[in-house]
Image (tube, rainbow, N blue to C red):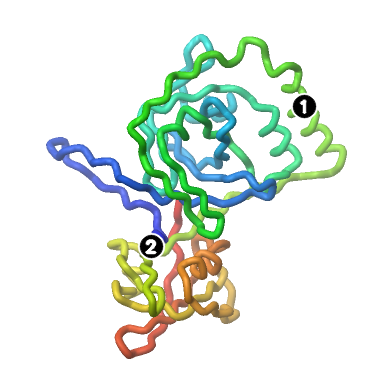
Amino acid sequence: MSFLLSVTAAIALAAADPPIKPADRYEIPYRLTDTKHVLVRTKLNGKGPYNFILDTGAPAVFVPKKLAKEIGLKLDSKGWGEFESFEIEGGLKVEKATTRVEDLFQLEGMNGLGLAGVELHGVIGYNVLAKFRITYDFTADKLAWIPLEFDPPPVRAIGGGGQGGLELLGPMMKILAGFMGIKPNFDAKPRGFLGFETDERKDGVFVKAVLADGPAAKAGLKPGDKLTAVGVAPSGSKKKPSMLDIDRPRDLAKAFAEAKAGDEAKIEILRGDKAETVLVPFGKGL
């Protein structure tokens, strides 16, 4: 089992080069919000990242009007638009993704009260999710998305009658939050990344591959290094990080769960029979 600890590197192609073949499987980083929604990060029309929750009960991708304006989304007369680019963290680009532009009271209310612990920008629903076989493993830090040869039919029968009056709940919850003195804190903290992939073997966790020019490569981490312990020192901290022994890839996910750009990873390794320590500054992820 391997876990990719990096964002996908951008690849420049000459005009004469053949198009990139889609992968057979994508490892999509996710997190659970405080309300236990599955959250992934996206870039829309080259802008972002934005926080989207996965909702198998939603018929389509939904974005609020403010975000649609921010990314320059062009709409038809019924409130539908097609993204110029729709990218999900983990290297997945969804072609010809359409979206419904609507201010969902559920998101407005959750954001107004800060219930999710993070600002939510939209919902990914059936018209995108149906294109993939998605494996949920809540003991891991990534979801497996396998592309299917299935093009879901367009969803166009939404809207026209509002949300049955429920659309008033969003603004009401915002007002309620003000009366209660609730001020959600949605400061952006870009995900830190190190740029290496691991491989779990019988005798431990090893570095499988290192992203060229990534933080790990620049710090000297090499394929074949056995990871024995890791720790994270927050940016600007002079304290020594507490170290966590590495027996499974999930130990890495636990150790790096809160790491952000500018923090430093202390990685203890075995290179052959020699024990070494590598210090790797976290780069800025998506």
User: Relative to residue 284, is residue 233 depicted above or below?
Assistant: below
Three-letter code for the amino acid on which mark 2 is drawn: Ser
Mark in the foreground, 2 or 1? 2
The percent coordinates of residue 135 (x first, y second) are 47, 47
Query: In this rendering, would 165 be left or right of 87?
Result: right
Residue at the image position 37 percent from the left and 73 percent from the top: 201
Residue at the image position 49 percent from the left and 25 percent from the top: 99
- Which residue occupies the foreground of this view, 150 or 10? 150
User: Relative to residue 4, is residue 208 depicted above or below?
Assistant: below
The residue tagged with tag 2: helix, strand or loop?
loop
Query: In this rendering, would 143 be left or right of 274?
Result: right
The percent coordinates of residue 240 (x first, y second) are 57, 81
Report how far apart the C-alphas of labels 2 and 1 lie in the structure.
44 Å
The percent coordinates of residue 152 (x first, y second) are 42, 25
Q: Residues within 10 Å of mark 2 (few under 14, many from 20)?
A: some
The residue identified by callout 1 is 169
Residue at the image position 36 percent from the left and 36 percent from the top: 148
User: Relative to residue 191, is residue 101 depicted above or below?
Assistant: above
The residue identified by callout 2 is 2
* Tally of marks: 2
Question: Quadrant of the image for the N terminus?
Answer: bottom left
Q: Quadrant of residue 7?
A: bottom left
Query: In this rendering, would 200 be left or right of 63?
Result: left
- Which residue occupies the foreground of this view, 197 or 127? 127
The residue tagged with tag 1: helix, strand or loop?
helix
Residue at the image position 36 percent from the left and 64 percent from the top: 197
Three-letter code for the amino acid on which mark 1 is drawn: Leu
User: Relative to residue 14, is residue 233 depicted above or below?
Assistant: below
